[in-house]
Image (spheres, rainbow, N blue to C red):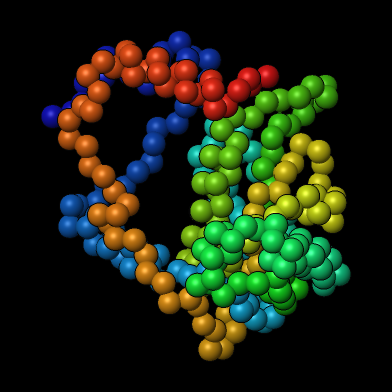
Amino acid sequence: MPARYEHPYPAPEVEAKYPFDVLDVHRYTDDEMLARAEDCYQELDRRRSVRMISDEPVARELIELAVIAASTAPSGAHHQPWKFVVTGASAVKRQIRLAAEEEERVNYLEQRMNAEWQEALAPLGTDHHKEFLEIAPWIVVLFEERFSFADDGARRHHYYVKESVGIAAGLFVTALHRIGLVTLPHTPTPMAFLTRILGRPVNERPFVVFPVGHPVAGCKVPGLRRKTLDEVMVVVDRPMWSDVTAAASIDRVDSTALDGPTS
């Protein structure tokens, strides 16, 4: 039987003030949904992070379509607080590579990354050499917009920025895979040099770097396994806390302690 909502969405007074659309959705049968779910998993399970990216040209239109697909991501207050900065210019890619390698040289060779961190990375075989940043036909740097500016110059706050940008990043990776391209979410630490090289404004902060292209012939990836469903999913079938009001108040205290002031 249909769900009965005591407080339907949107409220009439809200719909009278703002535009709303009727959701256009296609309903599949249970068998169709199961088949689609299995196909989706099998396709995404073939996705791998690739460090040996070919210099074979890739049409910019493909990058644009991947970016616009990623921008369908949900975001806090629908502010879409991200900017995908794209370059295929050799001189720009060269600067990004050199700056990233210098930061990574300090990380790897001067122990800015502690022993535990380097041990965790050992099975990946990574080091401070980042040639893919220059060889890949495209570099896409995803920036998070911490705030924006209104027409009068006033700051416009954005909400759940990292959560929103993280979802957009995931959709970008998925879109590239669906298209038939490969990438590597690369996070040189620190990343402030990207702001300078790419000429980005003060309200933007680099979030992740994506070299994009085709894999070189015979490309290898680490022989790792992914966690099983039992390792990543927990089903809760009864309340684990008897006093809901108390649980909510604890959440508010924890949130304040962790996040600090929002102004």
Answer with the quarter of the image where residue 151 lies. Answer: top right
| Residue 28 spot, x, y in % from top left | 24, 51
| Residue 5 point in image, percent of width and height | 26, 19
Residue shown at the point (19%, 52%) measured from the top left: 29
Whether residue 188 appears in this view of the structure is no
Residue closest to the eye, 39 or 27: 39
Left or right placement of residue 214 versus residue 109 in this view: left
Residue under the image location 59 percent in, 61 percent down: 115
Looking at the picture, how far across and down is residue 245, in whole percent? 32, 13
Which quadrant of the figure contains the N terminus? Answer: top left
**Image vertical order of residue 214 relative to residue 3, above or below:** below
Measured from the top left, where is residue 67 in percent x and y? 61, 55
Residue 240 visible, this angle: yes
Q: How many numbered circles are shown?
A: 0
Q: Quadrant of residue 119?
A: bottom right
Q: What residue is at 22 percent from the left and 19 percent from the top?
A: 242
